[in-house]
Amino acid sequence: MTLERLVLIAIWVLIITAIVLFIPRKKRREAVLAFLACQAVTWVNSTLHVQFGLLQFPVREFPKASELLFTSEYMMYPVMCAFYYIYEPKSGKLPRLLYLAACITCLCVVDTVIEKYTELIKYTNYSVFLTWIDFVVIFLITNIYCKWYFKTPAFNEEKRVVQ
């Protein structure tokens, strides 16, 4: 078994474990919507990146079906976005901005390690900085959509009613 296949298996084990252990029952509906919304945006975004020659995925799970890496594009990034959404601080613009920056930076570090040490991702005409901006846009689009869907304010501080 190659290093790439071991990394993919490890990612799946970590994702499933994280979903089971860290998504509270009360937040599952929100997490599923954030996951699906992020998945849709990521699919379009990643397809465009591959078509324009910015990214390559030399080792893929379904090489005849797609030019994309299923595990990262359809599972890892959307699950991380779901965690970002359900655990986002509810008040204060600075804590929310710092939380977004921290989540995106961690995701970019993982992405960079995968790119550097495996054949799963290859940046052709791309950089970590562009990846960071890309994730910020994807996570913000997902956040705005989910806030709209659940009728909560997207950019303003949320007001909590104490009963």
Image (cartoon, rainbow, N blue to C red):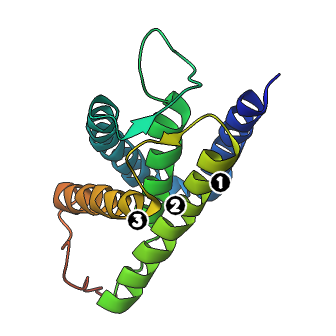
Q: Which residue is mark 3?
A: 129
Q: Is residue 96 above or below residue 126?
A: below
- Camera-side residue of 79 and 161: 79
What is the three-letter code of the residue carrying label 3? Phe
Q: Is residue 139 above or below residue 155?
A: above
In the image, taking residue 147 as reference, residue 18 lies left or right, namely right
- Camera-side residue of 144 and 4: 4
Q: Which residue is mark 1?
A: 113
The Cα–Cα distance between marks 2 and 1, rounded to whole angstroms, is 8 Å
| SS type, badge 1 | helix
What is the three-letter code of the residue carrying label 1? Val
The Cα–Cα distance between marks 1 and 3, rounded to whole angstroms, is 14 Å
Residue 108 image label = 2
Instruction: Return the disc, 2 or 3, that comes first in the chain's sequence.
Output: 2
Percent coordinates x, y for residue 65 in the rendering: 42, 11
**Structural crowding at the residue carrying mark 1, measured as other residues with C-alpha within 10 Å and reported as few (<14), some (14–19) or many (≥20):** few
What is the three-letter code of the residue carrying label 2? Cys
Hey, which quadrant is residue 11 in on the image?
top right
Is mark 1 in CB contact (under 8 Å) with mark 3? Answer: no
Instruction: Return the disc, 2 or 1, that comes first in the chain's sequence.
Output: 2
| SS type, badge 3 | helix
Percent coordinates x, y for residue 146 in the rendering: 26, 56
